[in-house]
Amino acid sequence: MILYTPISYEDIHYTEKDYQQNEFISYQNKPCCIQRLENGDMRIVQLLSTDPNDYLAEHFSPGTIISSSENLQ
């Protein structure tokens, strides 16, 4: 079977372990999927917004680190 998609292989074949590592939070009133780091900080995995302008903001880019001391709301 051939699957033509712009989505990465990892996003399609998500393992249970991968799913458990991610959390969904509201960061600056925008829904985000994040991973918690060992030091308490968070890494943005994905922005889950319906506003296209949100994706232009660099602070919502995947891989951005959110300090544990930042206010999440």
Image: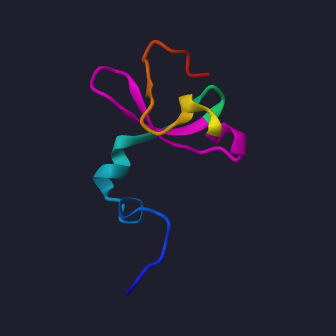
**Residue 37 falls in which quadrant of the image?**
top left
Q: Residue at x 32, y 56 (%)?
A: 16
* Quadrant location, the C terminus: top right
Q: Is residue 22 above or below residue 11?
A: above
Q: Position of residue 57 (x, y in %)?
A: 62, 32
Vertical position of residue 28 compared to residue 53: above or below:
above
Residue that extends furthest to the top in the rendered view of this protein: 69
Is residue 52 rendered to the left or right of residue 44?
Answer: right
Is residue 38 rendered magenta in the image? yes
Spot occupied by residue 60 in the image (x, y as percentages of width and height): 55, 34
Picture mark count: 0
Q: Nearer the viewer, residue 61 or 25?
A: 61
Residue at 49%, 71% in the rendered image? 5
Dividing the picture into quarters, in which one does residue 40 lie? top left
On the picture, is 45 further left or further right than 29? Answer: left
Q: Is residue 71 above or below residue 34?
A: above
Magenta segment range? 31-55
Q: Is residue 43 visible?
A: yes
Give coordinates of residue 1: x percent, y percent.
37, 87
Front-most of residues 53 and 69: 53
- Colour setting: rainbow
